[in-house]
Every structure is written in C-alpha cells, then in structure tokens.
Image (cartoon, rainbow, N blue to C red):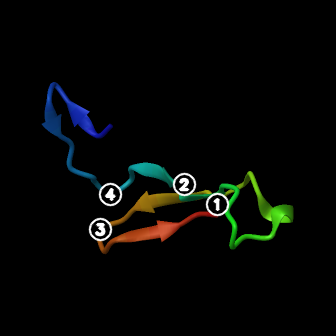
C-alpha cells in the first residue's frame, strides 16, 4: 500500500521497491497434470531514478 494518512504516495528518486508478479496453475482439463498446482514468482528489486527506474536484480 503506497498511501500515507490516506493519501497516495508519490515515488521519488532513491526509493526502492519490489515487483513480484506471480503465475499459479490450477488443475484444468487442458493442462498436463504434471503442471497442476505449480506456482512461480519472479521478483525484481527496482530503484526509482530521476529518469524512471533501474532494475537492481
């Protein structure tokens, strides 16, 4: 949550955050059972810069 006292926080140079997308496979007829109930998370640490961001990992 990027709110402080109910107000959205603005990202500023020097702040670091983690981006963590996840993929989770549930059992399904069109999915090979070997892949049922598998989850994958890819994490990246990112620092905010004046120009945008820089991926640290």
Quarter assignment of residue 40: bottom right
In the figure, is residue 6 to the left or right of 21?
left
Which one is closest to the eye, mark 2 or mark 4?
A: 2
User: Residue 53's spot in the image, x, y percent?
Assistant: 40, 68
The quadrant the C terminus occupies is: bottom right
Which numbered tag is attached to residue 50? 3
Of pointers 3 and 2, the one earlier in the residue sequence: 2
Disc 4 to disc 3: CB gap under 8 Å: yes
Of pointers 1 and 2, the one earlier in the residue sequence: 2
Residue designated by label 1: 42
User: Residue 6's spot in the image, x, y percent?
Assistant: 14, 29
Frontmost residue, 27 versus 4:
27
Residue designated by label 2: 20
In the figure, is residue 15 to the left or right of 41?
left
Disc 1 to disc 4: CB gap under 8 Å: no
Residue designated by label 4: 13
Which one is closest to the eye, mark 1 or mark 4?
A: 1
Separation of marks 4 and 3 at Cα, in angstroms:
6 Å
Separation of marks 1 and 4 at Cα, in angstroms:
24 Å
| Label 4: element kind | loop
């Amino acid at each position: 949550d990027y709110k402080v006292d109910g107000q959205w926080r603005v990202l500023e140079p020097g702040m670091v955050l983690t981006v963590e997308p996840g993929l989770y496979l549930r059992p399904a007829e069109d999915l090979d059972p070997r892949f049922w109930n598998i989850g994958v998370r890819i994490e990246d640490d990112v620092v905010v810069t004046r120009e945008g961001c820089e991926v640290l990992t």
